Amino acid sequence: MSNSAGTITSHQAALTVNSTGTAPTITTAPANQTVSAGQMATFSLLAACTAPLAYQWQKNTVAIFGATSNSYTTPVTTTADTSIAVFGLH
């Protein structure tokens, strides 16, 4: 700092920079399921990374509201139901 009367330097301050952590990896992927119309299916996976870890399941590339854990059970299925996937691990 300085002004017309002089200059002064503060004491040094320490800066610690931590690594950004590890990217998520899927250690056990969800298994394909085959059910009859009218039944439910449960998908699960195991993932690892630096906390926090978040999940978002999707159906046909659209996020399923509230499906944010490492497992997901479908509502009762119809013959039009396909393409369940987990997305957005972070």
Image (cartoon, grey):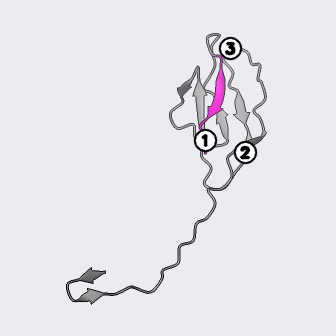
| Kind of residue at badge 2 | Ala
Image mark count: 3
**Any magenta on residue 84?**
yes
The structure residue drawn at horizontal position 60% and vertical position 45%, both measured from the top left corner, is: 90
**Image mark for residue 55:** 1
Query: Which SS class for mark 3?
Result: loop
**Image mark for residue 47:** 2
| Kind of residue at badge 1 | Tyr
The 10 Å Cα crowd at callout 1, few under 14, some 14 to 19, many 20 or more, is: some
| Kind of residue at badge 3 | Ala
Q: 21 and 25: which one is in front?
A: 21
Magenta span covers which residues?
82-90
Residue 36 falls in image quadrant: top right
* Separation of marks 1 and 2 at Cα, in angstroms: 10 Å
Pointer 1 or 3: first along the chain: 3
Tell whether 15 sits left or right of 79. left
Pointer 3 or 2: first along the chain: 3
Pointer 1 or 2: first along the chain: 2
